[in-house]
Image: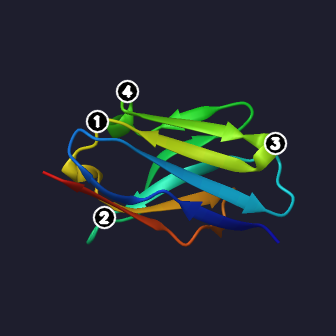
Amino acid sequence: QVQLVESGGGLVQAGGSLRLSCTATGTISTHVPMGWYRQAPGNQRELVASKSRSSTNYAEFVKGRFTISRDDAKNTVYLHMNTLIPEDTGVYYCRYGVIRWGQGTQVTVLL
């Protein structure tokens, strides 16, 4: 059974950067998307970015600021977040396929 372990969240000033990591245990497929979602207080969970062997997708609000990368040899997906703004604050969740979620990691961006 695939499990996802996230790391890399924290507190950062606006304009700063963070890198999130998510490592999957168990056997995964490179054709199945791994990605990041986020949820701010009072909001629904929303897609940030996802990546499979054949496609990469970004939410409009992160294009040009965030980059998703994937190291299939390590079963790990990364989210490189630059030029962070307070609106990026929330819990960031890793996802594999459609049913596997990580426990979430908090990202807080201060003015």
Percent position of residue 99, x then y: 67, 67
Label 2: which secondary element? loop
User: Disc 2 marks which residue?
Assistant: 40
Relative vertical location of residue 46 with respect to residue 58 in this rendering, above or below: below
Left or right of residue 102: residue 89: left
Tell me where residue 78 sits by quadrant.
top right
Rendered image: mark on residue 83? 1
Relative vertical location of residue 40 with respect to residue 55 in this rendering, above or below: below
Percent position of residue 13, x then y: 21, 49
For marks 4 and 3 on the same chain, the one whose residue lies earlier in the sequence: 4
User: Disc 4 marks which residue?
Assistant: 64
Q: Nearer the viewer, mark 1 or mark 2?
A: 1
Q: Amino acid at mark 1?
A: Thr
Q: Are marks 1 and 3 in contact (CB under 8 Å)?
A: no
CA separation, marks 4 and 1?
Answer: 9 Å
Q: Amino acid at mark 2?
A: Ala
For marks 3 and 2 on the same chain, the one whose residue lies earlier in the sequence: 2
